[in-house]
Amino acid sequence: YWTHRAYHEVPVLWRLHAVHHSVKSMDWMAGSRQHILELLITRTLVLAPIYVLGFSKEVIDAYIVIVGFQAVFNHANVSVRLGPLRYVLVTPNFHHWHHSQDQEALDRNYAAHFAFIDYLFGTAVKSDRLWPGKYGVLGDYVPNGFVKQLKFPFTWKG
């Protein structure tokens, strides 16, 4: 939660993370769109402590598989409401709002696994609509194309 929130609130980190948010149509592949530097930073911040704390290779492998599945699942175009459990676990319905350009959803729904964290810190989207109206970065200023997005975080113009 806090790492993801930092990617939104610290301008230099946002430049990296904006590449992930530049997708304008959510589907199961959207979770794979990341700047390579963000990927390296995030994996280091998550996996290094797990390794240093002495978790076995099997536990680390299981964690990677679960997180990989959840990234695909949460970006997919499927509606999974879960009843009251939707306040506990992140689902596509919850995470899609995080990618919304809708004003009510900007910088909301940071949690990757447990939705209750956003409710706890007051960052959960409270909308009566099932899905957002529009996806992507507000202002659509992230360029299209792999090479342009690779350069984007380092070409600040303003």
Image (cartoon, rainbow, N blue to C red):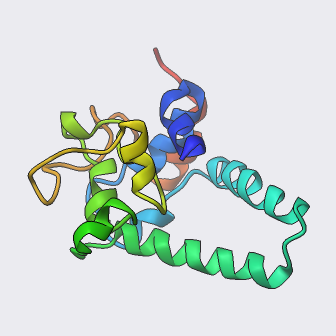
Q: Residue at x 66, y 75 (%)?
A: 63
Closer to us: 84 or 2: 84
> Residue sitting at 46 percent across and 60 percent down?
114
Horizontal side of 65 relative to 34 (left or right) equals: right
Whole-percent x, y for residue 65 in the image: 62, 80
In the image, residue 68 sits, relative to residue 18, either above or below, namely below
Residue at 36% across / 39% down in the picture?
123
For this orientation, the residue located farthest to the left is: 128
Judged left or right of residue 60, residue 101 is left
- Is any atom of residue 81 visible in this view? no
Residue drawn at 57 percent across, 41 percent down: 2
Q: Is 54 displayed left or right of 81 in the figure? A: right
Task: Evaluate whether residue 75 shows in this view.
Answer: yes
Give percent across and percent down for residue 27. 31, 70
Relative to 131, does residue 150 appear above or below in the rendering? above
Residue 97: percent from left, percent from top: 27, 51
Task: Report the label total.
Answer: 0
Residue farthest top in this picture: 158
The correct choice, above or below, for 88 with respect to 7 in the image is below
Name above or below for residue 79 compared with residue 93: below
Q: Position of residue 107 (x, y in %)?
A: 37, 36
